[in-house]
Amino acid sequence: MMMSEPGRINYLADELLGLILSFLIADAEFPDGREILQDYAFPPYNNKRNGTNAVASRGERTDLDRFSAEGFRRLNELVDMQQAHHTRYFTYMVRPYYQGRDWERFLAEIARDYPTLSEIHTARLADQTSLVKNARDILSLKRALVAFTSLQQIKLLRLQDRADEDIMERARRFVSVRDVKLDWEPACSRAIEGLALALMGSSCQSVRFLGPQLSPEAALKLLNAPRVTMSALGERLTCLDIYFHSASDVTALMSKLSTTFKDFFQAARNLVTINVGFPADRPLNLHLEDVFHHIHWPRLRSLGIQGWRLHSSEISAIARRHQSQLRELRLPYVYLLDGSRWRDVLSILHDDMERLEKLNLQHINYASHFNTEIMNGIEIPPGSTTDEDEQRDEDDDTNPNGELEPSQSDTDSSSIASIHDSQSEISSETEESYRQQHRYPYRHHHHQRDLQTLSEQELSMLTANDLGDNGIYVKREHWHIWEKWVVISRRRL
C-alpha cells in the first residue's frame, strides 16, 4: 500500500538501507577459495549491476524476497522467466507476525485518525493470514530453490520499518487494546522451516547460511526435527553465520539444544566458516563444547564466537584443534571467567596457530569486570554480527615509520563507542585502586613506553607477559594491540 506523502529514505527499514549500501561496495574475492568474512551481513556483491534484481556483469544475480503476497508473486515470476539458474545469493526478508486477537478491532479504531497507517497494516495482516493458511510461502520457497541451481548463499533477515514502529506506538496509547503485538519468534520459526524444507528439496549442496537476528525460541523448535533431517541439512552447508537476538538470557534455552547442535555439527563436515553469536549485554554462560562437542572440521578457515562467558582453556582447545588451518578467529564480547587470563589465550594463538591472518578481540574483557558494570548500571549494547564487522586494513594503523598509530574507535560505530567510553576507558584513579586492591602492579615495559607507540618489530619482541594484561579488566586500547601482536608473529615467519 502506498503512502500518501512522498517517501523518504529514513522511512526505509534498516535492513533495506544496509542492502542498498551493499550494492555500492565491492568486496575482495579470494582466488584460493578462502572465506575470511569481511562483512557478515552481506555477500561479496559485484559492483557493476543492472536491473531491479541486481543482475551482475557476469550473469550472476542476487534475489530478494519479502514475506508478502507481492514478494512471492515476483519470486514465482522469476522462476517462470527461467532466469533463476543465475541466482547465487538469496535474501529472505520476513516481518514479525501479527499476534493477538485485537488486531482487527484496533486497526478499525485508528482508521479515522491514521487512515494510511491502518491501511498498511490491514493489508499486511491479510497477507500474513492468507500466506500461512494456504502455505503459499513454503510452496514458493520450495519452487524457487529447486530452480536456483547455482545458489551459494541464503540469508534470513528480520524486516521492520517505520510503519511497524508507529503502529506499536499507537497500540501503547490505546488503553482498550491489550492483545496486539508484533512477534518475531513465530515468523522466524516459519521462515527457518520453509527455508529448510526448500533446501532439502533442492539440488544445492554447498550453501552458506546467514541469520543475523535469529530467535532463540525459534531455534528451540529444532528439538522436534528428526535427527536425520538436521544431519542432512548440516551436510549441505559450507558456512553457518548466526546471531541469536534476545532481550533475556538464553543460556537455559541453548543448553536444551546441546544434542541438536551435536547432531548438526557432526554432519556439517564441509563447514569453512562458523560464526555463532549471542547478545553482548547478556552473554551465554555455557561451556563452549556444549555447542561444538569437541568436533574438528577439516575445512574450517574462519571461526567466530561472540557474546560468551568462557574459560581460557575452552578457547585454546578449539583453536588448537584447527591450528594448522584456521585463518580468521573472532572473539568479540567474550568475557573470561575467574581463574582465566587473556595472556594465556594470546600466548596460544601467538605460538601455536600456523596460518592465522586475522584476529578480532573487540570488546573482550573479564566476566567479573562485566558483572561489576552491570551491577553499577552501566549500559552494555547488545552487539550483533552485523553492525561491527567493518573491514579493517592492518596497514591503516601503521605510520610510515612502522609505528602503530593510537587506536581511535577501531571497528566501533559511534553509538557503541560512546557507550563503551564509559565502561572500557579506566581512569587513573580507578586503575590505581585496582593495583592497591589486588596487589598486582600494572607495568608498562620498555621503560614505561606506551604499547601503542611501538613499531611492529618492537611489538614482535614482546612476550604475552609484556602486553599489560592485569587479569582484572581489559583496556580499550589493548584490543587492537593484542590483535596486532598475534597476527604479526605469522607475518614475520
Image: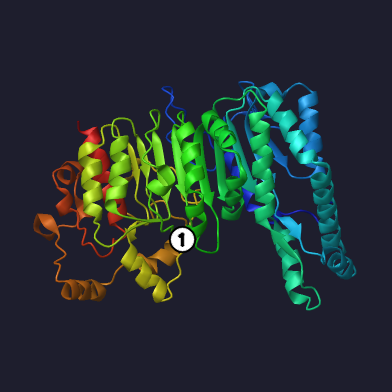
Residue at 42% x, 72% y is 378
> Residue 468 lies in what quarter of the image?
bottom left
Query: Horizontal and vertical percent for residue 61?
Result: 65, 28
Give me the residue at 14% from left, 71% from top. 439
Q: Is residue 414 above or below residue 459?
A: below
In screen coordinates, is 381 left or right of 364? right
In this view, the residue in front, 390 or 82, is 82
At numbered mark 1, what does the secondary structure look like: helix, strand or loop?
A: helix
Between 262 and 43, which is closer to the camera in this rendering? Answer: 262
- Give the image location of residue 384, x and y in percent: 50, 53
Is 229 placed left or right of 490 in the picture? Answer: right
Q: Residues within 10 Å of mark 1 (few under 14, many from 20)?
A: some
Identify the image's colour scheme: rainbow, by chain, secondary structure or one colour. rainbow
Question: Is 41 rendered above or below residue 179?
Answer: above
The quadrant where residue 79 appears: top right
Q: Is residue 131 above or below residue 439?
A: above
Question: Does residue 389 appear anywhere in the picture?
Answer: no
Q: Tell me how many marks there are.
A: 1
| Amino acid type at mark 1 | Ile
Q: Quadrant of the C terminus?
A: top left
Q: Is residue 229 visible?
A: yes
Q: Is residue 171 left or right of residue 309?
A: right
In percent of width and height, residue 303 lies at 40, 40
How far from the left and from the top, in percent, is residue 315?
Answer: 31, 47
Disc 1 designates what residue? 416
Residue in view at x 76 percent, y 65 percent: 167
Which residue is at a point 38% across and 66% down the rendered structure image? 421
**In the image as oriented, which residue stretches furthest toward the left?**
447
